[in-house]
Image: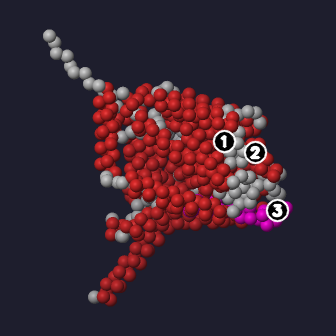
Amino acid sequence: MTDSAPTVAPSIGIAALHDLRDHRKHRRMGDVEWFDLAYRVYIVAIFGADAFLWLSSLIGDDPLSAPSADEVLRNGPAVMGMVAVLVFMSGLRSGAQGGPLALETADVVHVMLAPVDRAHALRRPMVQRVRSVLFLGIALGALAGQLGAQRLPGSPGAWAAGGALYGVTLATLWAGGALLAHGVRLPLWAATTIGAVAIAWQGAALVWGIPGVADLDGGLALWGWRQRPIELLATAFAVGLLVAGIALAGRTSLEALNRRSALVSQLRFAVTMQDLRTVILLRRQLNHENTRRRPWVQLRRPGRWRVWRRGWYGLLRFPAVRLLRMGVTAVVSGVALGVMATGTTAALLVGMFALYLLGLEVLEPLSQEIDHNDRTDQLPIERGRLLLQHIAAPLAALVPFGLLAGGAAALTIAVTDGPPAPGAFAAVSILAVPVTLAGACGSIVSVVKDAPDPVSVANQEAYLPPEVAGFGTAIRTIWPLVVSTLGVLTTLVARAAHTAEPDDASAVIGGAVRGALAAALLLVTTLVWVQRRDRVRAWYRRFVDEGKSYTKQNWS
């Protein structure tokens, strides 16, 4: 008689997994009462919503005229459908590159290799990931809808609800596309091809008025104005993608999860430390984005302008994916600034953020120099002057992207505002490049502020009160965005001139010239700050030390 091994019910392994996860969650969060947590969320939501409503009412844009509103109703589904296509393409590419899940290393090494059903083990992380994406989509959609209520017919509540429906549909579309692409092991080239075809189809719908592949998704963005039940098919399609992706959870690649978990853990730590440069590098690694071995164009031998040539050598090795992303970012900034010029002031935030990201992309030569600060300090040249030379090539490279943004802004004005205002295209031509360079000033500040301070005292913030240290950290984080916002605000000068004298082209052009001069002044101020940053810090340190010495002598 042979002894047989005792059989274990499959549910025991899953129950043990749930117990381990609950225990880890309890150890991580401690003795936190659910009532206290819900109260905190409630307080943050209330104050956040009140602050947003106050800021949106402070903008106070005028409602659109009847012809302009009809134009939005006619072209709005195609335009917002293009946003849905871009979101879907992003989800497909994320899934083809191993996303969207990012487990902890212990889960990948132990749980995924344990004798439990992989699909069941991934259910909770998958639900958490989808839940966070859906919450973000609802929040952003509701905020965008509330802003749209200022210029379009309909109540703010209806626009917030319609925007939330549009946002949750896009979030579901992204998550479903990513999970499905990962489950079927979709190659990256196939994901890019599908996305490119969808973009071309939707672009044709936008230009020639044919039915688009994502018109139903875009129509959901207008539900604060009018409701078409057939557009709910877009939500049903997104939910179907999500269900199919969840059903394929058992086909998740362990190699992709292992690589992604390591990079995401480093990414979260970099975000906690506010190391923006590391965040950018890790995001490129997650996207499998590598520089070219050879530049697009071979340069001549270096002459006197060695730093200039070195900057261009780095820029010309950008991969095609990064150049395409920069072009899309420039178009988004141009469209946002064009919408802002027609009266929607809230679009300024989109344009600012797009130009800020574009500046971070193109400032790679400057970032590389700051990453190797030990070599910089050994060169017989002042740090500020060297950093200033590394900015020259990126600023020159921004010029064609500024022209691209200007073309997108001009096209947006021509489409959304009916007959263009006198001098509108001339104003766009004048402002395109200066505003792009001024919007990138915040990126320059963000990169340069990470350079080491040669006169700082080690761990000097450790002796500051938490309130003071936290306030200083907040200022350092927000300040680059404020600088980029100032650069984009220069476009409001031309809009104010048009509002004062609608039929005077010379007034609009004069306002554009003044705005361009203000943008140039901001750029020059930023460059002077880069060059003299170390000198100012050294002077301030001497001033503080002299004050301390003087006080010490008087008290002794």
Q: Secondary structure at mark 2?
A: helix
Q: Secondary structure at mark 1?
A: helix
The residue that disc 2 covers is 73
Is residue 497 within the magenta segment? yes
Q: As drawn, which residue projects farthest toward the front?
A: 35
Residue at (31% x, 52% y) in the render: 30
**Part of the protein shown in magenta:** 482-506
The residue that disc 3 covers is 502
Residue at (31% x, 34% y) in the render: 15
Q: Secondary structure at mark 3?
A: loop
Question: In this view of the protein, can residue 81 be seen by the observer?
Answer: no
Q: CA distance from mark 2 to mark 3?
A: 25 Å
Q: As drawn, which residue projects farthest toward the left?
A: 1
The residue that disc 1 covers is 220
What kind of secondary structure does the magenta stretch mostly adopt? helix
Residue at (68% x, 59% y) in the render: 345
The earlier-in-sequence mark between 1 and 3 is 1
Amino acid type, residue under disc 1 in the picture: Leu
